[in-house]
Image (cartoon, rainbow, N blue to C red):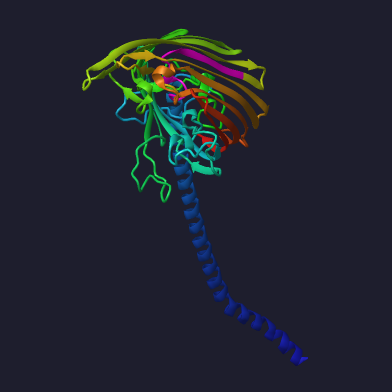
Amino acid sequence: MTTSIAKLARRPLATALLVALLAPGMALAGTAKEKELEARIAQLEQQVQALLSQQQQQQTQLTQTQTQVTEVQAVQAQRPAVPEGKQPIQSTTIMTAANPGTTFSYGGFIKLDAMVTDTSDGKIADGSAGRLFYLPSAIPVAGNDVDGGDPYTDVHAQFSRFWFSADHTTDAGDKVKAYIEADMYGGGNNSFAGNETSTNTYALTLRQAYVSWNNWLAGQTWSNFQDVAALPDAVDFVGPTDGVIFVRQAQLRYTSGPWSFSAENPQTTVTPYLSNSARFNTGDNVLPDLTARWLTKGDWGHFTVAGLVRQFKYENLATDQGDTETGVALSVSGKYNLGDSDDIRYAVNGGQGIGRYLAFGLGSDTVQAADGSLEALDGYGAYVAWRHAFNPKLRSNLMYATAMFDNDPLLTGFGVTERSQSWHANLIYSPFPKLDIGAELIWGERQLEDDRAGDLRRLHTHVKFSF
């Protein structure tokens, strides 16, 4: 019993001692935890403060952005409304030297021509124009006993072209236009750079360069005597060249409604007496070539009539020979739509001294008499072309053309061209707009006054991309 009492007496004492020993540690533990909590609270307060500051910055930026948007909307509201329809890509001028508000445009096409030619009476001279496109005057005519030889091939890209245009409307509503166009056909070249041995380099050639102001035009462009809108859809450079009026030259033109009038650069082509030398040009003219045209058009197509009055003049100071002659010519042409898929294009041309204007000068304007006087030669030409579209990607054209000249063999001799004619048939495939892949079969014939004739057979192909 004494032992039990002793054990009971010792338990409170042990408990007291244990409490006395643990109390300081518990106090110390409580103090450390409070410090840790205080540190965490301080850290959270810093984070909250940072978030509040960031939110204030974002709110400031949103307010500034909203202000800017409001200002832009106010400026846009003051601008005039954009009209309906297709709008120009260029809204301001890129031509620093031009009048304010002048717009600039650029275009053209890349064209590769490849052709195989077979001529009956000898070959067309290599490098000449007749090797590049159908040119009736280049068809060799020698006689039935001359062998034309094997067919020959030509490939070139000389008809690729580009143009620039600057258009301006004044505050008073006057419309002013400047236009220039060039290609690589007909330009000069040197014997190394321009030949087909190495580089096939060709010089830039001026096609058109003019300025127009309202109804007036001054500069070089298509003759007012030519109906460009009636030209057939050909793979060849021109197509039915025999019957086509084809001239670009310097001129002054006035247009009012359906009427247009022009004074154009004069030039006279002359066949010497009995063709004892080569045909030549003379610029002795005093008066310009004068033209007048009347045009009517509609959904059905167009119809036009043009007249030409010319002066022919030649002076030979060495022989004291010379003369002046006049000529008058007429052209009727147009295009008639036969529904959505077909159209007919045509032209009939004729008159005195029409030679320079018809078929790239197939005949002369004049012939010289023995005394040096000039006589205007009568010439006639015509063509008709039927165009048919099988579908939006495939189309075909069938063409016929002819030209003839009323030569006086007592003056011209028998070695001059009396007539020519040609047939053309093509297929043109456009896998997508502006890209044409075409092939054209051509048969042409040239006949002289002595009834000798030569013919040409050609397969002409091209790849053309317009831009």
Q: Is residue 80 magenta?
A: no
Identify whether 117 is placed above or below 354. below
Q: Which residues are drawn in magenta?
A: 344-361
Residue at figure coordinates x 36%, y 39% from the top left? 203
Residue at figure coordinates x 47%, y 20% from the top left? 245
Q: Is residue 354 magenta?
A: yes
Identify whether 226 is placed above or below 73. above
Identify whether 428 is placed above or below 312. below
Q: Residue furthest right?
A: 1
Q: Nearer the viewer, residue 454 or 340?
A: 454
Q: Is residue 390 left or right of residue 148?
A: right
Residue at figure coordinates x 51%, y 20% from the top left? 403
Residue 365: image quadrant is top left
In the rendered image, residue 183, in percent from the top left (x then y), is placed at 41, 34
Asked if residue 364 can be seen in this view, the reply is no
Identify whether 20 is placed above or below 118. below
In the rendered image, residue 402, in percent from the top left (x then y), is placed at 54, 21
Quadrant of the image containing the N terminus: bottom right
Q: Nearer the viewer, residue 45 or 13?
A: 45
Q: Is residue 370 left or right of residue 453?
A: left
Q: Nearer the viewer, residue 88 or 209?
A: 209
In the rendered image, residue 206, in percent from the top left (x then y), is placed at 37, 30
* Numbered circles on residues, count: 0
Asked if residue 309 can be seen in this view, the reply is yes
In the rendered image, residue 432, in percent from the top left (x then y), is placed at 61, 35
